Amino acid sequence: MVWGVCSWRDMGLLIRLETTLTGDRYLSILPDHLHSSMSIVHSDGLGQFQQYNARPHASRVATKWLQEHSSDFRHFHWPPKSPEMNIIEDIRDALLHAVENRSAPTRTLLNLWTVLKDEWCELRPRYLQTLVESMPHRVAALLCVRRGPTRY
């Protein structure tokens, strides 16, 4: 499992998680990596942090930490269970596709981690911009289906 930050203009850090993510483990990532990642991808200080709202993200400890640090960065509150609205899903799919299409298969976890980091760094700003620019269309599609599944 990995955790990462990206923006309209750049990819931030990609962090390898050795085990399943829980609220407490997520809390160990935020203080160590969120501030530095946000400063990389939003050097102007105008970025908003958005998360997927999986259980660890919405845990009491993570929510409390985010509230306590709300003056450090803006946190975009995202509806739960709305993966079709989060561009990280598209990025995950692009990474999986790139890994699957490698000429040499990944045989070890270490090799997979190396390939993921390489592919993460290869994602181009124009790809990220296209994803961000698709948000109005995604919101409109979601509103049309009244929060049901969309084609995204």
Image (cartoon, rainbow, N blue to C red):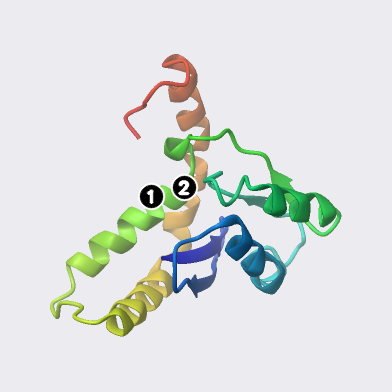
Of 7 and 19, the residue lying toward us:
19
Q: Position of residue 7 (x, y in %)?
A: 57, 58
Give the alpha-carbon distance from disc 2 to disc 1, as whole Å.
5 Å
Q: Position of residue 70 (x, y in %)?
A: 82, 52
Asked if residue 146 lies left or right of residue 115, the reply is right
Q: Quadrant of the N terminus?
A: bottom left
Decide if residue 37 is in sight here.
Answer: no
Residue type, mark 2 in image: Ile
Q: Residue 87: which numbered mark, if any?
A: 2
Residue identified by numbered label 1: 90
**Which residue shows up at 65% across the image and 69% down it?**
28
How many discs mark residues in the rendered view? Answer: 2
Asked if residue 149 lies left or right of residue 69, the reply is left
Q: Secondary structure at mark 1?
A: helix
**Which residue shows up at 75% across the image and 63% down it?**
44
Q: Quadrant of residue 68?
A: bottom right
**141 in relation to 59, above or below:** above
**Which residue shows up at 52% across the image and 31% down it?**
136
Please tell me how crowded label 2 is: few (under 14), some (14-19), or many (20+) other residues with Cα within 10 Å: many
Q: Position of residue 22 (x, y in %)?
A: 54, 58
Q: Quadrant of the C terminus?
A: top left
Are the residues tagged 2 and 1 within 8 Å (C-beta)?
Answer: yes
Of 130 and 29, the residue lying toward us:
29
